Amino acid sequence: MKHILTTTFCASSLILSACGGGGSDAPTPVVETSTADTQAPTFSGATVSAPTVGAITLAANATDNTQVTGYCFKASSVAPAATDACFQASSTQKVALAVPNVSYSVWAKDAAGNVSSALTVRGPCSAAGYAASDASSKPAVCVLTTLGEFVVELESSKAPTTSANFLKYVNDGFYANTVFHRVISNFMIQGGGFTSDLAQKVPTYAAIALEAPATTGLSNTKGTIAMARTSVLNSATSQFFINVVDNSFLDSSSGGYAAFGRVISGMDTTVEAIRNVPVKSNGSEMSLPNTLPLVQWAYQLK
């Protein structure tokens, strides 16, 4: 006869009687504990949209070990509490442009209420452009073109009418998508009046009275910005030019051309690049760029 050997296995170490175990050998139950989330979100960057009329859009990107639940944008460096009403789900916010241009701060928070350090966002002008503006005590305008950026400071005390007229066109967004349509490398670069298809834009405001160099003391030297006009003295509207050499002959005692500011950033780069674009005849002179340098936007920094 064959004998069938049977083996008894312990189904569970907790069934001590079935396995012959003693009470002192019972295992200690494991209690799971959770660690509070104390890690705040961190920023990977921010962007600023091209300015539209009176506004820009700020966008920030933050990451967290769990999840970013809100962003707070403020024109202040005072850190918000996690319960602050400024926090919103969207990582973008449209803000009105302020003059003088201000810095914006953004914070991110997570579900545990951890708030990040602030990220400073200023605007689409470059760090060099802001530095030049900050170093000047005068109104300043940042201009981005397809060949780079430049910043001009305006002589608002010496040429108040001309400066105010230029700023009205800037702040209305008039110069966006206009071109430098006249480039003479040993003279000046001119823009502010034509679109990329060479359609002339209708000026928004009436022509201004000439603030002549003899009155303002502002000469058409290299790097200055001045108003273009017709043969009529008081005919300047939106078109301007930048002198790329000294053109003191434009300071004519019979009227001349109204210089009203100076390029303080981008003269040796952007203005120089525009100055050297290849040109062709426009019917009267060799001054029409083969590829028109486009003004993408212009806005007042202060």
Image (tube, rainbow, N blue to C red):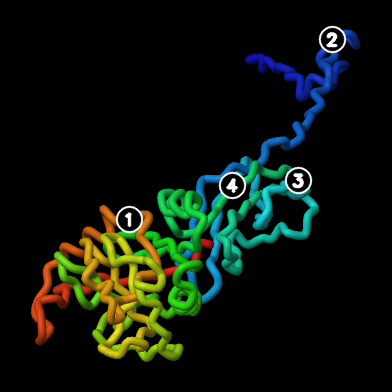
Q: Secondary structure at mark 4?
A: strand
Q: Which residue is mark 3?
A: 113
Q: Nearer the observer, disc 4 or disc 3?
A: 4
In the image, which disc is placed on residue 266? 1
Residue toward you, 55 or 4: 55
Q: Tag 3: Cα neighbours inside 10 Å, few (<14), some, or many (≥20)? A: some
Q: Nearer the observer, disc 4 or disc 2?
A: 4
Image-based side of 278 in relation to 20, left or right: left
| Residue type, mark 4 in image | Leu
| Residue type, mark 1 in image | Gly
Quarter of image, res 243: bottom left
> Where is residue 214 shown, x and y percent of the image?
35, 72
Q: Earlier in the sequence, mark 2 or mark 1?
A: 2
Determine the CA span between mark 4 and mark 2. Answer: 58 Å
Determine the CA span between mark 3 and mark 1. Answer: 44 Å
Q: Which residue is mark 4?
A: 119
Q: Secondary structure at mark 2?
A: helix
Q: Tag 2: Cα neighbours inside 10 Å, few (<14), some, or many (≥20)? A: few
Image-based side of 170 in relation to 98, left or right: left
Q: Nearer the observer, disc 3 or disc 1?
A: 1
User: Is disc 2 in contact with disc 3, using a CB cutoff of under 8 Å?
Assistant: no
User: Is disc 3 in contact with disc 1, using a CB cutoff of under 8 Å?
Assistant: no
